[in-house]
């Protein structure tokens, strides 16, 4: 079964109930360390995401997992490659038992083709060669708590000096790009409006790409915890997974985004709103076509 959008207490409750109802005598959680948690379950152990491919971990786990083992796959949608080494190692573990629970905050990384990774992990990879399609969703049971991120822009006016710097840097970057990665241009241009946005930022917790601006109560993406929320967004990350991790760790789903009057800010804002729309559409598919799928309103 796939559980989407559950909090840690809810995950614990699902695992503990499964153990009671199914006579499980061993529980193995496969989870990135920053998402892992302890469970009152028989012979419980947690294995960090990078460890799953290590010989020192892989072969002992293969011997350890059997038909009475519950394997919990927790927040392990980390790679868009459906056949990456880590997923393939997980498949070997999951082939040892039919007792599997999959937990994930959001149903995708970038688009709903990513959902098929969760689908594979929950269904013994029986449809591994098949692309995403709503006709397959009836084959997996899904619990849904909608965690769609929503973004509201907070306009920030920049001064003439900042606008001139932006124009000059943009021209320079395009002239020197050559065969380089075009994504380096928006990544770097986006930082130029940082000082103006910092000056206009609310006196609450803030999240930004890095700590260059020395703001009080500042957090950055890729931290392991976010205890001071809710957070306002000084800027958005470039990588969607960084934002998905932040949302999962903070529990926040509504975001005020500082929006400078520079084209790159608008580009990022539109990019993340398009991502939000893909997530909304994905939830719609899962509710409509998922096998015995059920959901509830987004939790606070």
Image: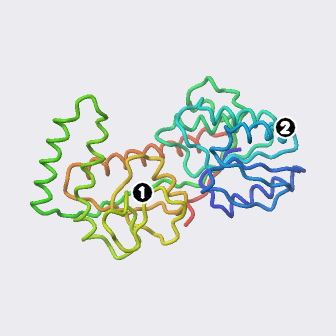
Q: Determine the CA span between mark 2 and mark 1.
A: 44 Å
Q: Residue drawn 81% across and 57% down?
A: 17
Colour approach in the figure:
rainbow
Q: Is residue 34 or residue 257 the one in the foreground?
A: 34
Taking the image as shown, residue 165 lies to the left or right of residue 140, namely left
Q: Is residue 92 or residue 292 the one in the foreground?
A: 92
Point out the residue furthest to the top here. Answer: 129
**Tag 1 residue:** 150
Taking the image as shown, residue 138 lies to the left or right of residue 252, namely right
Q: Residue drawn 43% across and 49% down?
A: 276
Kind of element beneath mark 2 = helix
**Tag 2 residue:** 63
Rendered location of residue 25, percent (x, y): 89, 50
Q: Residue drawn 34% across and 71% down?
A: 215
Rendered location of residue 138, percent (x, y): 66, 35
Using the image, determine if residue 200 lies above or below residue 17.
below
Rendered location of residue 15, percent (x, y): 76, 55
Viewer-nearest of discs 2 and 1? 2
Quarter assignment of residue 192 = bottom left
Q: Residue drawn 70% across and 27% down?
A: 126
Using the image, determine if residue 28 lies above or below residue 233.
above
Return the disc, 2 or 1, that comes first in the chain's sequence: 2
Quadrant the N terminus occupies? top right
């Amino acid at each position: 079964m796939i559980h989407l959008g559950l909090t840690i207490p809810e995950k614990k409750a699902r695992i503990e109930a499964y153990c009671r109802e199914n006579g499980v005598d061993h529980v193995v959680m496969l989870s990135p360390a920053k998402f892992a948690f302890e469970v009152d379950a028989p012979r419980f152990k947690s294995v960090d995401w990078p460890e799953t491919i290590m010989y020192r971990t892989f072969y002992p786990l293969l011997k350890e997992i059997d038909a009475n083992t519950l394997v919990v796959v927790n927040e392990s949608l980390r790679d868009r490659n459906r056949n990456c080494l880590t997923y393939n190692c997980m498949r070997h573990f999951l082939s040892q038992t039919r007792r599997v629970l999959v937990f994930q905050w959001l149903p995708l990384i970038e688009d709903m083709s990513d959902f098929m990774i969760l689908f594979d992990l929950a269904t013994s990879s029986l449809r591994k060669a098949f692309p995403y399609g709503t006709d397959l969703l009836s084959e997996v049971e899904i619990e849904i708590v909608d965690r769609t991120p929503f973004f509201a822009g907070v306009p920030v006016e920049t001064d003439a000096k900042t606008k001139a710097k932006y124009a000059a840097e943009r021209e320079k970057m395009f002239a020197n790009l050559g065969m380089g990665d075009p994504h380096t241009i928006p990544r770097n241009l986006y930082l130029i409006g940082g000082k103006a946005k910092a000056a206009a930022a609310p006196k609450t917790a803030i999240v930004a790409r890095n700590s260059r601006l020395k703001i009080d109560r500042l957090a950055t993406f890729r931290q392991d915890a976010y205890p001071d929320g809710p957070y306002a967004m000084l800027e958005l990350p470039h990588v969607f997974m960084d934002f998905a991790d932040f949302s999962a760790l903070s529990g926040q789903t509504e975001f005020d985004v500082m929006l400078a009057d520079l084209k790159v800010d608008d580009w990022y804002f539109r990019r993340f709103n398009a991502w939000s729309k893909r997530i909304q559409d994905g939830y719609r598919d899962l509710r409509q076509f998922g096998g015995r799928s059920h959901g509830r309103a987004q939790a606070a």
